[in-house]
Amino acid sequence: MKVTGIVLAAGVGKRMNSAFPKVLHKILGRPMISYPVDALKAVHPERIVIVAGKWMDEIKKALKDDAITYAIQKKPMGTADALLKAKRYLGDLDGTILLCNADTPLITHYTLKKFLNHHRVKRNTLSFISFNTDSPSQYGRVIRDESGRVCGIVEDKDATKRQKEINEVNSGIYAMEAEALSCIKKIQPSLVSGEYYLTDMVEIIYRENGKVGTYPIKDSIEAQGINTRADLSRAIDMMRARIISKWMDEGVTFIDAGRVFVEPAVLIGRDTIIYPNVYLEGNTAIGQGCTIYPNVRIIDSSIGDDAVIKDSTLIEESRIEGSSSIGPFAHIRPRSIIGRGAKIGNFVEVKKSTIGSGSKAMHLSYLGDASIGDGVNIGAGAITCNYDGRMKHKTVIEDMVFIGSDSQLVAPVRVGKGAYIAAGSTITRDVPAGSLAISRAEQRHIEKWALRKKTEHRKQKTENKKQKTKNR
């Protein structure tokens, strides 16, 4: 049977107290709206229509999906009005509409599939997901007649004192057949808010002897909406816990699962161990048997099997091959490749460079715009001078080169295979393979210099005392 997905995203979200729309606030690196949209996509609708307000362009930019149709609701006049705005894009609709709110990011596609199947089996004109809660004040109450049939939904601000005591509430997630849309024009504005409520369709269909039903869910967390910053924080915690639980089932060890953040698109291999305060973001892929120590942040990068990422390391848009060791306090900047078994150590920064297999840069180095071969040793404090004030230039270091401590390689420059660079050298010309390059001033010894320095110091000290006495 045909399905059309609709997402309502035109609400202002005043309680967020934000300069941008509620539905674009991020949950683990992704805008809130992307979660219900993805859940809808998983039920394979023929199309998805998003009803947005003045922030439509920003929502389009965030979702980056040309297959989505957008309907504009210039003035927020309620959920029924929003559905009416979407209706004009539905054409000769045949089938079922599955409608979600953009601020329900925790709903899963598993629940939507079960809900849709329930709706079809019951042959309802309209169904909605309901749940019981001890804190129903944010939700519309489900009203039932004497026989237990659903006969209406009353919004909290319109509810009587007795109705407010009802704990069964509406999630705002609906399935409805095409004929239900004819009820929209019969909806009257609320006397309190002046808005047109989609919930009023329930009473109209009930009065006209249509079939309305609920799909109660036990896990009310899935259907809870985001209205405040506190709601957003809780949703982040719930999503984070859901993702980490999934990876634990897949064989990943978390030393402190409550203090790790893993975004939805991240992949993690079996037998990897992750310590606290680790952030894995974007399209990151972690191999099998890796160890990621505390305070590490990895963004849009791949980490090969058995790699070790040590404390307080940042890796961005780069590839780390298997069995490598990175950190502690290392920074791997975008477009870098660290070869198999390579070691990047304390306070080393790598930018847009390739480091060959088995190569080492263990201390206090900067390697920018460099191509470094296999088995290279980079001494402490060595740097590539890649910027001349106008342009970046490349440094090439071939296999098995030894770069002495505190050396500067002024690009563009090439160091041939097996060459040695003496410590403290400034290299401005290409170095032939197998040679030693040394560039430093000749060492001189000035005899008894230290003794004379001490004598001068004592004499100056005595003169200063005399001057103070005289001034008194």
Image (tube, grey):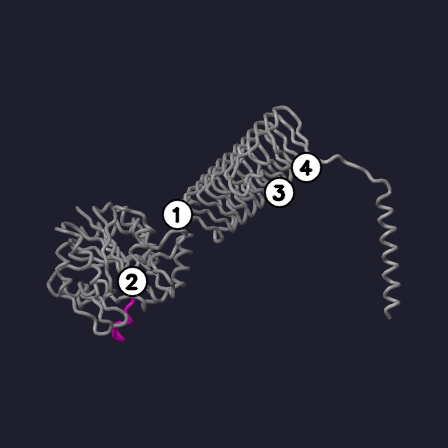
Q: Distance between the residues labelled 3 and 1?
A: 34 Å
Locate residue 420: give its quadrant.
top right
Q: Residue 424 carries which label?
A: 4
Q: How far apart are marks 3 and 4 (CA)?
A: 14 Å
Q: Residue 364 carries which label?
A: 3
- Between 188 and 22, the residue placed more toward the observer is 22
Mark 3 vs mark 4, foreground winner is 4
Q: Which mark is residue 23?
A: none
Looking at the image, the residue that sits furthest to the left is 208
Is tag 3's residue or tag 4's residue first in the polypeptide sequence? 3
- Between 215 and 343, the residue placed more toward the observer is 343
Q: Please, is residue 208 above or below residue 325 in the view? A: below
- Whether residues under marks 2 and 4 lie with C-beta atoms below 8 angstroms apart, the answer is no
Q: How far apart are marks 3 and 2 (CA)?
A: 51 Å
Mark 3 vs mark 1, foreground winner is 3
Tell me, yes or no, whether the highlighted magenta stretch contains residue 167: yes
**What is the secondary structure assignment of the residue under circle 3?**
loop
Badge 1 amino acid: Pro
Badge 2 amino acid: Gly
Q: How far apart are marks 2 and 1 (CA)?
A: 25 Å
The stretch of residues the image draws in magenta is: 159-169
Q: Would you say 454 lies left or right of 435 here?
A: right
Is tag 2's residue or tag 4's residue first in the polypeptide sequence? 2
